Structures are given as C-alpha cells and as structure tokens.
Image: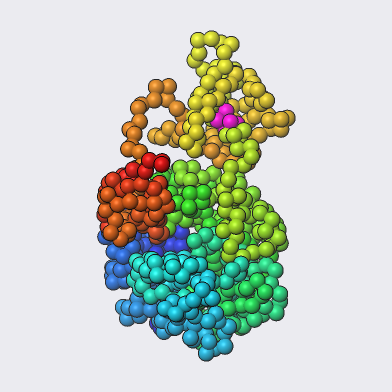
C-alpha cells in the first residue's frame, strides 16, 4: 500500500464514527472531507468537516455503498486518504483496492487480509489451519434435531444483520430465506452458514493493532455479551471474570489470526466463550469497532491516530502501554425496547449527558433521526480505577441524561447496568432473553412519579415571568381564588390531571418554580425537576434523578375530534419500506392471530407485521417495495365472531 504523509482525509461514512474520526484528524492537523446522502445534507458529520461532497440519493445502496462515488468525491475534494469507519464499505476488499488504485492511501488492512476474513466461512478455514479453536459448521441441508439450536449467520458482514436462531427444524427453511434476504440487502451477498448456537455463552473479543514492520499488539479483551437482536448494547474492557490462562489463550489466538493474514492497522478478533470456559473463534472484523473507545480509555491510546500512522508506514513500539482501570460503554438508541425494539424517528430536541463521561455522537440538538440508517444516538463511556466504579458512574450519567423528542433505551441501559447479574459480572448473550420483560416493565411507583412530573410541568408553565414573586407566578388566571388550579397532560397515551394550589400540594411542598426549574419538597427531601418547553411543539419534557424522564403533552380544553380507523386496521408502526409480503396473501384469505403478513425494513432492520387476531383479511394496501409513512394503513383484518 502507498505509505506517504497524509494531508487531507475523506471519511467514507456518516454519523457518530465520521465525527469521531474528524476529531482526531483535526488534532493531527489534517484537512477533513465528508460525504453525505440527501437525508444527511445537514448532518453533524457534514457540519464538522472542512468540505463535503453530495452522494445523490437516500438509500445506502445508492450512496454510502457506492465506492465509485466515494472515490470520485475524494479526488474532487483533493483528499489523499480514505478512512472507511465501520459498516458500509469498511470490509470491502474491492473498494480498498480501488482506493489504492486511485492513488489514495487506504486507512485499513491490506485488501488481501480483508478478503481472507471477509467471508466467515473462509475465515474459519484459515483459522483452523492456524490452530485457532473453532465451532464445527453444520450443513443446513442435513441438520437434525440433535444439531439444534442452530445459529444462522451472514457470511459477509456483521452487526446482527442476516442472523437467526433456529430451535425447530420446521422453521429452518423460512429462517434461511429470511437471513439470506437480509444479508443480501445489507451486504450485497446472500451467503448464509449455520453453526451450533451456544446457550449462555459470552461474547469476548481482542483488539489487535499491527504495523507494516511485523509488530502485532493484542490490546486486551472486551466483553460484549449484552446484545439485542445479536447487536451489542453494553461493552466493557477488560472482559471481567476471565481466568488469566484463558485471557492469555485469547491474546495468543488473536495475534495468530492477525499474523495468518499479514494484518496491518486496527482489527478485532471475536470469540465465543462457553459457560465452562472454552473459547471458539467467531470472526475477525478487519476495521475499527463501534466499541473501540473502551480500549482507548483503558490503554490511554487514540486508535484512529494509530491507524493513520500505520497507514503512513510508522512503526509501533515493540510492546503496547500497560492497561489501567476499567471502562464501560453503553449504546444509546432511539428505540422502544418494550415494543420489540421498535426504532424511532423524529427530531432530537435535546441530548445532554452529565458527569465525567465520554459521549460520541453524530447528532446535535435539533437534528432529525431519519428512517434510512441505524438508530444509535450516541455512545456513552465511563472509565474508572475499578469495574464497580465505572459501572456506577455510567449508570448515574445515563440516569441524569436529558434526551428529548424520541423514545430511547436509556432507562433500559440504567436498569441493565444496575442489574445484579451485570454488577456481579455474570454475563452471557441470553441476558435480555431472560430479563427484558422485567427491565422494561413500569416501576412500582410509576404513577406517583408521573404525577410529580406533571405537577412540575404545570408549575413551570404557570411561571412565565422569571424573577416574579412566587404567589404571582403560581396564581394564573382563575375565577375563584381559593380553588386549586388544574392542568391535564397525556403521558405515554394515558391522561393525567394535576390539581395544585399556589402554595402547596397534598404531600408535596413547592419550594420554587421557574420556567425551566422546579424545586419540590417530597417527604421532607428537596427534589429538582428540569423542565423544557418546545417553542413549536406542545410537548413538555420533565427530567429528574428522582422521577426519571417524562414527556407530557398538554391536553387542550377543547380537543379536536380524532379520525378513527376501521377496527382491525394494521397501521405502520414506523416509516419504512415493504420488503416482503406473505406468499400468496390476498384479500379474502383467512388469517390467524400472530401470523406474519408482511415485513417492513426501517433503520437497517426488518420488522414483522402480524395479524392482530384470527379472522379474514379484508384489505391489503401494502405492496412489495412500497414506502410507507408512520401510521399508514397497511391492511385490515376482520376478526372472526366468537362461537
């Protein structure tokens, strides 16, 4: 590969990782170039770059996956190097070759190394020859019940796309077809393979870094076992509760994997560790990982800077620095974990995380989270001398974060970090299968918390004049001075009425009330409530470490009549594209409750739309390839009359 000083860097990616790479590039004195799709024209990574080039279109296949357009953008903007980030073209050997052929420096491993590891099936053959322990593959065509459960995986790519767990042979063919279709859509390659699915295994990985002079570093371990839909949610370094002999085995296997393909740059070797401590090679990711900040924190390194220096031909010291402390990362997603992890779209009005934590994000206040890309809002990372301190600091920061405008997994993250299994480092990939319902159910005092949040919102709304006397601010307009004020809000679809007096409230004493901050004494303890009003939206956001976060919508005195939909209507739960319709489905068909009728693709995931009841499909408005908006009518099922 070309090894020469870099002066201008194009990042062939978007969002959080592009912003993060630009941060290091600026610190090194490099000019920065962004590329963007049409929905990303005003995205944060575009605003952060010195120059930006449009990739016409919206879908990844038309924009960020078009290597020819990305290389053309680099040449047009005068960049002399390309960093792929993660995802998209980051593990595409042909793209790496084309970058080099265009006279640009590729910030990544040699194309031959990418190619060797790009297919998980070929990578496993290579690792077997290198003596790295493996799970034996299973041929789906000859699989028996003795082989169950099986894990289907896309051969080209990761991030949970193209993965399915099969526990019943009757569903194997359907799962293979679905996994292959999803893999083809995400990576342009529909190859899928099967291997044994290890129950209660741990996902442990080793960060490697190599130069062009033969030095390979193993930068410790990371545990990434807490996953939803095979996508990581919470990661930490070092992986806790590993015997030192196992840690040494993983380091040696990771270095062997890197040397087997003459690796250069940053990469990650992933392993599955069984409950009895046996490690098996999963795959090697020939790129930077989403969770790289925890390794940076523990080793005091900037992995992006080291990637750039390796691409310029610099040599690493023979040994890496010594690790220090523990780091934990949580991925904050715009999604509803209680509703099958349903992604959310809309305006992110506020994103603020308190405390001494690192926040990597691709969004700023007022940015829009769209339907075309992953719904991750930010990564929040805490580093401390011990694991217990790092976990506690991260949970505290997330609990106090203000995230307005979208439903997120923030509360789930806080509860996960405080769950006994996590705090005691009893980790495995089945954590959310076992605990999701409990982690997402309302707190026992949820109604009382909501009532206090509504009270704070009402008090803040009645205080439009900062600095005015308390009685005047809380008095408002009313006909009977001795009667309490009332205000109604909807919270998560339920209506709440607040009745308050200028001076006090049953069980609560008002200490102060400003437009954006309310202080209440609750059971003798002073509690603060931060209140934010949107200038052009009716919602009111109330945040408090005591009650958590609440989004309240004032109920107008004279509500407009609502349009009503026909009983049995299936409405789109999110904007998306219809990528599958049940084979042969047509109006007049008999359907059963829970039967999948069609599939929507949104934010890189497929979402099943199922029949709400047994009955007759009386209308089908969705067609293959149809783009639908949130709330669009997809189908109507007339429920059968009870016998």
Is 130 placed left or right of 596 in the picture?
A: right
Picture quadrant of residue 64: bottom left
For the point 49% across and 76% down, the residue is 144
Question: Observer-nearest residue: 36 or 500?
Answer: 500
Q: In the image, which residues are magenta?
A: 451-456
Query: Can the viewer see residue 38 in this picture?
Result: no
Question: Observer-nearest residue: 118 or 469?
Answer: 118
Residue 242 position, x and y percent, is 69, 72
Picture quadrant of residue 444: top right
Per the picture, the main secondary structure of the magenta-coloured stretch is helix
Q: Is residue 572 magenta?
A: no
For the point 53% across and 87% down, the residue is 128
Is 212 placed left or right of 510 in the picture?
A: left
Is 557 placed left or right of 146 in the picture?
A: left
Residue 235 in the image: above or below residue 108: above
Residue 24 position, x and y percent, is 49, 65
Residue 345 position, x and y percent, is 40, 48
For the point 47% across and 77% down, the residue is 143
């Amino acid at each position: 590969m070309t090894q020469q000083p870099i002066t201008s860097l194009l990042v062939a990616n978007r969002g959080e990782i592009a912003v993060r790479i630009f941060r290091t590039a600026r610190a090194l004195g490099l000019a920065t170039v962004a590329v963007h799709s049409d929905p990303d024209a005003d995205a944060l990574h575009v605003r952060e770059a010195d120059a930006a080039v449009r990739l016409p279109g919206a879908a990844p296949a038309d924009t960020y996956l078009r290597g020819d357009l990305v290389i053309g953008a680099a040449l047009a903007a005068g960049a002399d190097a390309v960093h792929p980030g993660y995802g998209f073209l980051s593990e595409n050997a042909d793209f790496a070759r084309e970058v080099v052929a265009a006279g640009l420096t590729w910030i990544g491993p040699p194309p031959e190394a990418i190619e060797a590891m790009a297919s998980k099936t070929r990578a496993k053959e290579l690792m077997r020859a290198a003596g790295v322990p493996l799970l034996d593959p299973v041929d789906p065509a000859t699989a028996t019940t003795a082989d169950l459960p099986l894990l289907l995986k896309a051969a080209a790519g990761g991030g949970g796309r193209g993965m399915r767990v099969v526990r019943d042979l009757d569903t194997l063919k359907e799962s293979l077809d679905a996994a292959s279709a999803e893999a083809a859509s995400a990576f342009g390659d529909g190859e899928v393979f099967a291997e044994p699915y290890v129950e209660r295994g741990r996902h442990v990985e080793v960060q490697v870094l190599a130069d062009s002079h033969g030095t390979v570093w193993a930068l410790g371990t990371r545990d990434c076992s807490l996953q939803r839909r095979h996508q990581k949610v919470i990661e930490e370094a070092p992986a806790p509760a590993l015997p030192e002999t196992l840690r040494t085995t993983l380091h040696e296997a990771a270095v062997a994997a890197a040397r087997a393909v003459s690796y250069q740059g940053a990469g990650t070797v992933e392993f599955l560790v069984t409950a009895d401590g046996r490690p098996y090679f999963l795959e090697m990711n020939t790129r930077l990982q989403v969770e790289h900040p925890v390794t940076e924190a523990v080793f005091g390194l900037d992995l992006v800077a080291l990637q750039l220096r390796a691409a310029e031909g610099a040599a690493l010291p023979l040994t890496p620095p010594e690790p220090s402390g523990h780091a934990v990362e949580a991925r904050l997603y715009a999604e509803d974990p209680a509703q099958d992890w349903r992604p959310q779209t809309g305006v992110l009005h506020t994103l603020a995380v308190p405390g001494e934590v690192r926040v990597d994000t691709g969004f700023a206040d007022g940015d829009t989270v769209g339907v075309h890309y992953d719904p991750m809002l930010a990564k929040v990372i805490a580093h401390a001398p011990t694991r217990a301190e790092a976990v506690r600091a991260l949970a505290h920061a997330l609990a106090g974060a203000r995230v307005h405008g979208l439903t997120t997994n923030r509360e789930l993250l806080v509860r996960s970090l405080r769950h006994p299994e996590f705090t005691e480092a009893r980790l495995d990939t089945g954590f959310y299968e076992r605990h999701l319902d409990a982690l997402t159910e309302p707190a026992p005092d949820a109604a009382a918390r909501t009532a206090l949040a509504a009270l704070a919102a009402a008090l803040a709304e009645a205080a439009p004049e900062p600095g005015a006397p308390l009685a005047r601010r809380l008095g408002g307009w009313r006909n009977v001075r001795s009667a309490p004020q009332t205000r109604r809000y909807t919270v998560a679809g339920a209506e709440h009425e607040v009745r308050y007096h200028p001076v006090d409230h049953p069980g609560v004493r008002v200490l102060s009330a400003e437009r954006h901050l309310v202080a209440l004494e609750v059971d003798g303890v002073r509690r603060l409530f931060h209140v934010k009003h949107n200038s052009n939206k009716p919602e009111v956001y109330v945040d408090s470490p005591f009650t958590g976060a609440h989004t309240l919508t004032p109920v107008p005195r004279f509500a407009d009549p609502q349009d009503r939909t026909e009983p049995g209507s299936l409405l789109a739960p999110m904007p998306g594209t219809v990528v599958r319709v049940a084979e042969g489905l047509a109006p007049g068909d008999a359907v059963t409750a829970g039967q999948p009728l069609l599939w929507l693709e949104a934010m890189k995931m497929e979402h099943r739309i199922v029949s709400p009841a047994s009955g007759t499909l009386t209308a089908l408005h969705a067609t293959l390839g149809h783009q639908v908006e949130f709330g669009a009518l997809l189908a109507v099922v007339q429920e059968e009359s009870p016998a």
